[in-house]
Amino acid sequence: MKLIHFSIAVLLFSTTLFGQEQNTPDLQALSYNIHSPGDASISLSGNMIMNDPFGSQFAGGIKLRIFVSKKISFDADLVFGKDYSHFGPGIFGLPLMLLGEELGSSEDGDDSNTMFFFKLATMLLSAEHIAYHFPVKNTTDISPYISVLRFKQLKPDDVNVAPEEIYAHISFVAGIEINKYFKRFLLSPYAEYNIAYDGYFKGFNFGVNFGYYLPMK
């Protein structure tokens, strides 16, 4: 009888080990914050724009992101509202990077060298808005970011304001974003501080991005 009990115990223990081995890949499959170079996302955003001394307003926009390593991404956004807009050169550079990846896979010889310089130029164009991603949970990461070349236009409702005070303001931005992944979908609230290099205005922006994640593989 003791031998039977011992055999049953060994059988149950071996079943437990098998179950642990089966659980391991399942946990890995839930880790959506493990990125690869070439992964991308596109999001729509709702934003609250607060600029001193002009007050606050709602704005909408679009955000693009491409990962250049497991934890570093180049980002770009285009936001617009009533008499307001901002963007960085990455809004043009990131689509060109994606195009370059598609074209570069079939090029060789002199065309390959041309494509290399094309990719280099678009990366330099996009690198002004860079984010670093810290994994927090299987489906969450936090990404502080900076943008050193944001072009910002804000037209106040004041007919006495001179034209040079309306256009051509370039800003520095520092912010933080929380990225929550739902398989291929992405929800990202953010907050940021920005200040114009000419000192004309400064402010805080916050909002949320809702997007779709496009893995490279």
Image (tube, rainbow, N blue to C red):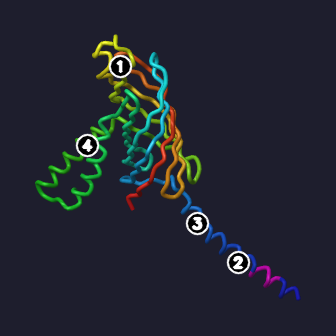
Q: Earlier in the sequence, mark 3 or mark 2?
A: 2
Along the line of sight, the residue nearer the viewer: 169 or 53: 53
Using residue 129 as the reference point, say whether residue 141 is left or right of it: right
Residues at marks 3 and 2, CA–CA distance in whole angstroms = 19 Å
Q: Amino acid at mark 2?
A: Ser
Residue named by callout 3? 26
Q: Which mark is residue 14?
A: 2
Magenta part mainly helix, strand or loop? helix
Residue at coordinates 87% horizontally, 85% vertically from top-left? 2
Say whether marks 4 and 3 touch (CB < 8 Å). no
Q: Position of residue 83 (x, y in %)?
A: 37, 27
Residues at marks 1 and 3, CA–CA distance in whole angstroms = 49 Å
Q: Amino acid at mark 1?
A: Tyr
Q: Quadrant of residue 16?
A: bottom right
> Which span of residues is magenta-colored?
6-11
Q: Earlier in the sequence, mark 2 or mark 1?
A: 2
Q: Earlier in the sequence, mark 4 or mark 1?
A: 4
Q: Quadrant of the C terminus?
A: bottom left
Q: Secondary structure at mark 4?
A: helix
Along the line of sight, the residue nearer the viewer: 25 or 75: 75
Q: Earlier in the sequence, mark 2 or mark 4?
A: 2
Say whether marks 3 and 2 touch (CB < 8 Å). no
Residue named by callout 1? 197
Q: Nearer the viewer, mark 4 or mark 3?
A: 4
Residue named by callout 4? 122
Above/below status of 213 relative to 62: below
Say whether marks 4 and 1 touch (CB < 8 Å). no
